[in-house]
Image: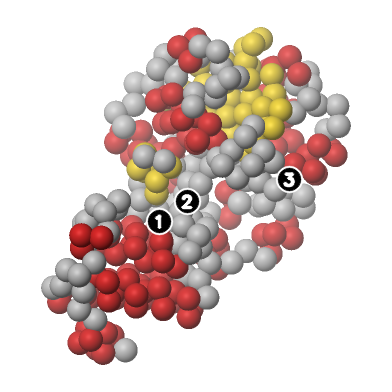
Amino acid sequence: MTTAALNDLITVRDYIRYAVSRFNAAGLFFGHGSDNAWDEAVYLTLHALNLPLDRLDPFLDARLLPRERETLLDLYRRRAEERLPAAYLTEEAWLGEHRFYVDKRVIVPRSFIAELLGEQLSPWVDDPWAINSALDLCTGSGCLAILTALAFPEASVDAVDLSSDALIVAERNVADYHLQDRVRLVQSDAFAKLAGKRYDLIISNPPYVDAEAVAALPPEYLHEPEMALGSGDDGLDFTRIILREAKKHLTPNGILVVEIGHNRAALEAAYPALPFTWLDTAAGDDYVFLLHAADLPA
């Protein structure tokens, strides 16, 4: 099939069509930056050819060199046969206009908190310049810690993760954004290494997949670090730690922002007395909650 493809597929248009057909035939799952075979094929093709990711039309009928054809066919093969997420194949992920290095040591970034940080958590933060300290718990690739530093120019940000491998990736991203003087990487199991530290803002996109959903995950997700996905039978084990410990790590007027996936109903049932504020995101208001320090249990 590869020989036939090299002989018969000539243009960028040909290769994108071929990729879409192959991805659909393979029954791939799309959830790491795109939600369909066409968008994924276009992204992989433009990336591999070092073309602008936002400009397809001028190149559709461009003819490809033999080496370019081979590169594209190998990329499509790995996506279809190995079921690797596109982000691991390209070693990059995008949150809005921001690019981050990723590999299999970290979960592929896809947090709704990113879009909220793009708005500086308005209206919940009145003065972005007044945020002096922030914590990103379960930082992974460091993307949310970096976006926090960009959103709040006066903030020193602690980026915490238990995985030493993840922190190596985060270190690279922090350096790429020249934020070494404002983002501190900390290896810690939740708050364990943060005794005495208090923050104006704590954000977290922790593990939140429940056991039933973990057992049914598509193959693409099985390439991601297991510890970054599952969180007990109901998906709330790590969120419980956050709710138990956060108050003593927040300043009196501090706020806590946490993403919990599809667990809103389970969380509200487990904590009926907490006045959760559910934040609007592109996917709705069921995925990210906010609590003020004063509302958290002591």
Q: Earlier in the sequence, mark 1 or mark 3?
A: 1
Which residue is tagged 2?
A: 108
Query: Mark 2 or mark 3: which comes first in sequence?
Result: 2
Query: Looking at the image, is 80 positioned above or below residue 293?
Result: below
Residue 166 versus residue 224 in the image, above or below = above
Residue 263 numbered mark, or none? 3
Q: Which residue is mark 1?
A: 87
Q: Seen in the image, is 61 located left or right of residue 104? A: left
Determine crowd level at label 2: few under 14, some 14-19, many 20+ residues with C-alpha closer than 10 A. Answer: many
Which circle, 2 or 3, is nearer the viewer? Answer: 3
Question: Residue at the location (34% across, 75% down)?
Answer: 17
Q: Amino acid at mark 2?
A: Val
SS label for mark 3: loop
Residue ID at (35%, 46%): 101
Name the residue rendered at 64%, 32% in the picture: 279
Whole-angstrom CA distance, mark 2 to mark 3, is: 20 Å
Q: Position of residue 295 (x, y in %)?
A: 76, 18
Q: Is residue 36 left or right of residue 254?
A: left
- Badge 1: residue crowd in 10 Å (few <14, some 14–19, many ≥20): many
Question: Residue 94, percent across and down?
Answer: 40, 46
Determine crowd level at label 3: few under 14, some 14-19, many 20+ residues with C-alpha closer than 10 A. some
Checking the image for residue 118, the label placed there is none
Please report whichever mark, 2 or 1, sits nearer to the chain's N-terminal start. Answer: 1
